[in-house]
Amino acid sequence: MLHDPNRVYVFDTTLRDGEQVPGCQLSTPEKIEIAKALEALGVDVIEAGFPISSPGDFQSVVELSKAVSEPVICALTRANKGDIDAAVAALKYAKRPRIHTGIGASDMHIKYKFNSTREDILVRAVDAVKYAKQFVEDIEFYAEDAGRADDIFLAQMIEAVIAAGATVVNIPDTNGYCLPEQYGAKILYLKENVKNIDQAIISVHCHNDLGLATANTLAGVINGARQVECTINGIGERAGNTALEEVVMVLKTHHAALNLSTNINSKHFTKISSQVSRMMRMPVQPNKAIVGQNAFAHSSGIHQDGFLKHRENYEIINPEDVGLDEAGIILTARSGRHALKHHLERLSYVIDKINLDQVYEKFLIMADQKKEISDNDLLALMSDGEEDT
Ligand code: KIV
Ligand code: ZN
């Protein structure tokens, strides 16, 4: 398989790992709406669901496969024939189907989840891949809890599943346990020690239990992974998955250093973020990177002044690149004259220095009584002034 070494594939699991979150469940038409938005965003793979888990999930994978044509449509299974049969049936209409099968790789999971041994787990992993490969060419294997797995055993497992036909090997940090250095070293270890690793794409799937999902994903990519598994707004089990918009904007912002690209049109981020938040009833925290309400808002006087002198003083991303019209200069009691003048000029007031000092005094009195000053407040403030003179 030949892949552009500088291309990072984006695998979106909003509709599978994200949708597992209590309260986030979607109907099939809602999932189709999000899947179409993900297609327009440019994701390479959509994980559509876990077909064996419920008739509703099965049907959603069927309908998504019909509705979306560009991205690969992926269905999750455990490493058993029943799950794989259900996934094969659900993917019947997919133009580019992928089965995502796997099993626990850490001793913790092997002993306490499967009550098994490394030897037995290895056999089950290989059997699942071989079985799935009879029906679908594109097989992704996940080594669950790889973040806490022994590297030597993990390498043995990955080599065996690639030999059995896996095209993508997913190394999940299922519990969000790893430090970026540890996770990056794990990916590098696999790159250097799995003999047939070049026959598959390494995928990274990180959870955010310690707030390190994006950092770990990047450490994986820097060390050779070429698929990132993410969700919109970072929704997912417990503290969530890696936020798609964060990884993509890191790669964009640091393109000169990393020379890695995705197919994502980041101008869709603001819209898809609010769509997912609204449909999944999952508010986005205001200070969330890239898509939070305050991500491009400047509120302190010093920052506003610096921003208005040159936006790059306080802006590393152009808000238009993520689909926002312009950065927000929010007027509060901490805003300075420069920010006030900016907004007054936007509202077509021409104001000189002396006038600005007078208006600013009134503005501060008003701002002390309100959290935020709106355009209407400014208009009222200015018309007050007119009556006075
Ligand atoms: O976190 C995880 O390990 C997963 C796998 C099922 C891929 O979601
Ligand atoms: Zn997961």
Image (tube, grey):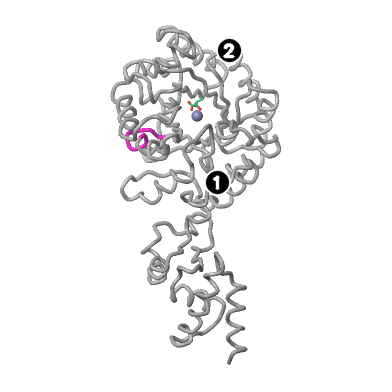
* Amino acid at pointer 1: Leu
Which percent across, then down, holds residue 159? Answer: 37, 17
Marking on residue 81:
2
The reply, left or right, for residue 242 in relation to residue 83 is left
Using the rendered view, name the quadrant where residue 279 is placed.
top right
| Mark 2 touches mark 1? (CB < 8 Å) | no
Q: Quadrant of the N terminus?
A: top left
Which residue lies at the image location 43% right of the left edge and 25% below the top edge? 169
Dot 1 lies on which element?
helix
The reply, left or right, for residue 57 in relation to residue 322 is right
How many numbered discs, if any?
A: 2
Depth check: give the residue in front, 126 or 337: 337
Depth check: give the residue in front, 110 or 191: 110
Q: Mark 1 sits on what residue?
A: 41
Please tell me whether residue 224 belongs to the stretch shown in magenta: yes
Dot 2 lies on which element?
helix
Which residue lies at the image location 45% right of the left edge and 68% below the top edge? 334
Question: How busy is the neighbourhood of tag 1: few (under 14 within 10 Å), some, or many (20 plus)?
Answer: some
Please tell me whether residue 150 belongs to the stretch shown in magenta: no
Q: Give the range drawn in magenta.
A: 220-226
* Amino acid at pointer 2: Lys
Depth check: give the residue in front, 1 or 141: 141
Q: How far apart are marks 2 and 1 (CA)?
A: 34 Å
Q: Does mark 2's beta carbon lie closer than 8 Å to ligand 1? A: no
Which percent across, then down, holds residue 215? Answer: 38, 39
